[in-house]
């Protein structure tokens, strides 16, 4: 039996002048970054009274909508991607001290998402140009494109890394999820390890459980699929183990797995956020609406 979970609004942050497209917490939970159609990134942190306030504003760096943002797992760097086809990298020295250290160019169309690997030395970017790029950062904060991954036939909407291994997952308008990794004993050659096909519409996003055992994906078909990594790890094809269906009436745009609990949150175009909790009493993998 799962206890009911109650969510309460604790703050409302005003500052953007256009649609807010993305949010990202720093790993320690002390800083929140937001981005949007006003082409800006705003940094938020609590003041002495415990109220969230805007502590830094990244402006005039991008010429079009800022789509997504991503902190490294150590919290030292923030990657920002834009519809202007570029990615900016910022070093973080505190809630009010960010410094621009690099601008990555190469994509020929809107950059839709960015994601750091667990070690923080590789950054993945994906684009409307149907490609995924992998960038490597050295100790001097210099970036080099390590691989350009072709395989999707439509926009690539999102990318995420496995939390323990350098296996990258991409989610696309072509209704598929692809897994990418370096060839055995050759870190310079990346290939598509396999393709997950179960969704029947655009796959918008995905999120791993903190232990890397499960991947949740959401799509325009109104479903959330949960995939399991077997004993061989994420380099071997994940298996579909359960589907959350019938909870949303329109496209499910976002899914996120709680880092501390076995909870999965979804957000959809029906203006609803749903929270699902793993049923610990079930012998099979089963989620119930929290």
Image (cartoon, rainbow, N blue to C red):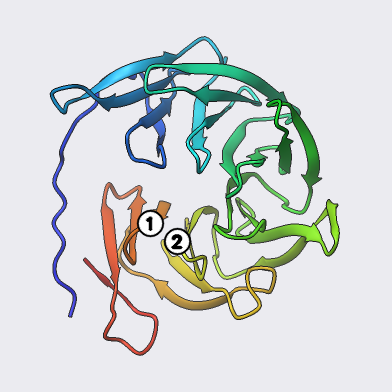
Q: Which residue is mark 2?
A: 210
User: Seen in the image, is 45 located left or right of residue 167?
Assistant: left
CB of mark 2 within 8 Å of CB of mark 1?
yes
- The quadrant of the image that shows the C terminus is bottom left
Reply above or below: 29 against 166: above
Find residue 56 and report its image quarter: top left
User: Seen in the image, is 211 located left or right of residue 20?
Assistant: right
* Residue 212: percent from left, percent from top: 52, 65
Label 1 element class: loop
Label 1 Cα neighbours within 10 Å, binned few <14 / some 14-19 / many ≥20? few
Badge number at residue 174: none
* Residue 267: percent from left, percent from top: 34, 51
How many callouts does the rendering have? 2
Reply above or below: 119 against 61: below
User: Seen in the image, is 48 located left or right of residue 211?
Assistant: left
Label 2 element class: loop
User: Seen in the image, is 105 located left or right of residue 196?
Assistant: right
Label 2 Cα neighbours within 10 Å, binned few <14 / some 14-19 / many ≥20? some
Q: CA distance from mark 2 to mark 1?
A: 5 Å
Q: Which residue is mark 1?
A: 259
**Disc with the residue nearer the chain's start (2 vs 1):** 2
Image point 55% across, 64% down: which residue? 200
Find residue 263 and report its image quarter: bottom left
State the residue lying farthest toward the bottom.
283
Reply above or below: 158 against 65: below
- The quadrant of the image that shows the N terminus is bottom left
* Residue 23: percent from left, percent from top: 39, 36
Image point 80% across, 41% down: which residue? 146
Image point 59% across, 43% down: which residue? 116
* Residue 233: percent from left, percent from top: 63, 72
State the residue lying farthest toward the top.
60
Find residue 176 and report its image quarter: bottom right
């Amino acid at each position: 039996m799962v206890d009911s979970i109650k969510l309460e609004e604790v703050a409302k942050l005003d500052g953007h002048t256009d649609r807010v497209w993305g949010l990202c917490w720093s790993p320690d939970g002390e800083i929140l970054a937001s981005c949007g159609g006003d082409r800006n990134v705003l940094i938020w942190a609590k003041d002495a009274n415990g109220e969230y306030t805007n502590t830094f504003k990244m402006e005039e760096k991008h010429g079009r909508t800022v789509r997504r943002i991503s902190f490294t797992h150590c919290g030292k760097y923030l990657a920002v991607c834009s519809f202007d086809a570029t990615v900016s990298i910022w070093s973080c020295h505190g809630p009010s001290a960010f410094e621009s250290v690099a601008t990555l160019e190469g994509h020929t169309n809107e950059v839709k998402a960015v994601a750091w690997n667990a070690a923080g030395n590789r950054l993945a970017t994906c684009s409307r140009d149907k490609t995924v790029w992998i960038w490597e950062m050295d100790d001097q904060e210099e970036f080099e494109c390590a691989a350009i991954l072709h395989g999707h036939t439509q926009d690539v909407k999102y990318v995420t890394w496995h939390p323990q291994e350098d296996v990258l997952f991409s989610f696309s308008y072509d209704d598929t999820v692809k897994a990418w990794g370096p060839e055995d004993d050759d870190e310079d050659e990346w290939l598509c390890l396999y393709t997950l096909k179960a969704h029947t519409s655009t796959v918008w996003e995905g999120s791993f459980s903190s232990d890397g055992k499960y991947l949740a994906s959401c799509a325009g078909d109104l479903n959330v699929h949960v995939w399991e990594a077997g004993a061989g790890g994420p380099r071997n094809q994940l298996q579909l183990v359960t589907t959350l269906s019938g909870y949303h009436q329109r496209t499910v745009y976002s899914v996120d797995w709680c880092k501390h609990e076995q909870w999965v949150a979804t957000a959809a175009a029906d203006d609803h956020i749903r929270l699902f909790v793993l049923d610990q009493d079930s012998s099979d993998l089963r989620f119930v609406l929290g």
